[in-house]
Amino acid sequence: MVRFLLLVLFWLSPLWVQAASITAQFDRNPVALGDPVTLTFTANGVVDSEPDFSPLQQDFEIRGRSQSNSFNMINGVSSVQTLWELNLYPRNTGTLKIPPIQFGGEQCQVPELQVLDQPPPTAGGTDDDILIELEAEPKQPYVQQQTIITQRMLHIAPLQQQATLSHPPIEAGKGNIQQIGSTRNTTMMRNGRNYQVIERRYALFPQQSGELTLGRTAFEGILAEPGPNSFDPFGISGKRIRRFSQPMTLQIQTQPAAYNGKQWLPAQSITLNAHWQTPVDKLKAGEPVTLTLAIVAEGLAAEQLPKLEVQAPAGIKAYTDQPELRNETNNDGIIGVRQEKWVIVVPYNGEYELPPITLDWWNIATGKQETAQVNAVKMHVSGGQVAPAGATPPSPVSPQQQASAPAAAAPTPVPPASTKWSLWEQIAAILLLLWSLLSLGWLVRLWQQKQRNSAPKTAVSSVLPPKADARVVLRQLEQACRQNQAQAAHDALLQWMDVGLNIHPALVSALREQAAPALQAELDTLNTALFGRDSSGWKGAALWQAIQTFKPATQVTSNDSGLAELYPD
């Protein structure tokens, strides 16, 4: 609204046809890095457009902006003045040359500003009441070696609660940095003055050799104003200040040429630990046992530790799952722990030796290569089967035994682990073989039965034995009766009923239904003699006499005399 009224007055008054003159001025020059500085633009006259302050963002952080307008008329002469005030924090030290600021069609040249690393000394000597600094140990680490970065803020003047301190950023080079431990509050003497100290520690792991630069860390806070009227429960009064540490550059060394390990591991110490779920002298064949291996590295993160190699003897299965990674931190650095669980299965009884497990690493304290090791273990396995011939792997041979063995002796061939069958695999194979044989036998029987059912009757009769002659059977029956042989008479009687009388099935009860009372009585006497277990007193003459007079229900007439008429044609 004010700008609108000024424009109206400008068009109504011929005295305001002159262009606005614009000037710029800092409230102080030089200024310390981190201290605020106020830049004021003054426009005497009407400005036809809003100013563009974006060129200032290259060298300053704009933390506040205000604008004021004034209108005066003296002796009939009118004037308009506009002020812009910007609260700035310099980003860099040195002489800052600022590009011109555009105000519509007008430009304003900003004077140069001198920015110092530290506040200039004053008579009271209070400008060094706050110091920010960084330290590194070691200053020339190896690549991937842990470097401890210590950040300190030293202050004498009391501070309000609203204060911040940034973390050290990596500006050049490659590395990983993280805070370790907790913030510590101590005191320290510096240049004869007792400072309160706020200290943080970080673990830095360089990822490549060469230079690595940590940028400035910034502190921003409010100094409490001393005096009787300095009570400020909200912490909004007092002198706002910013302080910066100096950048720090480290020279990162490459891996030493003397190191010949598989993986570069610079650490203060590395140990290997092993724990068996079951004692190695009480292992059971075919049962899995868990071997827990752990790498404990002081000065390395768990993510830097490699997978261990377990060289299981031939015939022994060993496999592992995803490892468990854990980092423990304190003020002295990081302790990385990698834990692996290995499952080991021994299929047969016997004694086996698990070779030692080793890990090469570089001792940064002594500057020498060392080896962490889990000693070889002898495993005693029982409770299962003895390995079949040719399947038991040879016992491990020590280097001394290899050196003393004759040169012409050829090593015993060891079947590959894939040809070793466990107890359960052998049982499964036997059951599968039995099932296959039974299935094959069942199929063969079905095929034979099908062949018998489908074969013609003439073919069947050709392979069956011919029926006995009825006359021969009848003579056998007569002989058995005359010799009083009850069992022989019974057998001959059944055969005669089959081939002579065509009674099917050939049962004594079927013959009795057709017989006369005399024959029925003799058949009952024969059965009594047989099933009463006392056939010695049986007399067969009466049976033979009754059979000769037997007339079947369906008789065929014949001209022949005698017994021939009893038989069918």
Image (cartoon, rainbow, N blue to C red):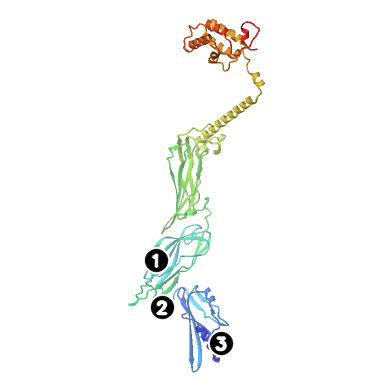
Q: Tell me which corner region of the image, top left, top right, bottom left or bottom right, holds residue 280.
A: top left
* Eye-nearest disc, 1 or 3: 3
| Residue at the (51%, 91%) spot, across then down | 78
Specify the label residue 19 is tagged with: 3
Mark 2 residue element: loop
Q: Is residue 552 left or right of residue 229?
A: right
Specify the label residue 273 is tagged with: none
Q: Please tell me which of labels 3 and 2 falls first in the chain.
A: 3
Real-space Cα separation, disc 2 to disc 1, in angstroms: 25 Å
Q: Nearer the viewer, residue 40 or 455?
A: 455
> x and y percent of residue 11 in the render?
55, 88
Real-space Cα separation, disc 3 to disc 2, in angstroms: 43 Å
Q: Please tell me which of labels 1 and 3 falls first in the chain.
A: 3
What kind of residue is marked 2? Answer: Thr
Mark 3 residue element: loop
What kind of residue is marked 1? Answer: Ile
> x and y percent of residue 519 in the render?
53, 9
Question: Is residue 359 positioned above or below 545 on the image?
Answer: below
Specify the label residue 198 is tagged with: 1
Can residue 363 be seen?
no
Q: Which residue is mark 2?
A: 122
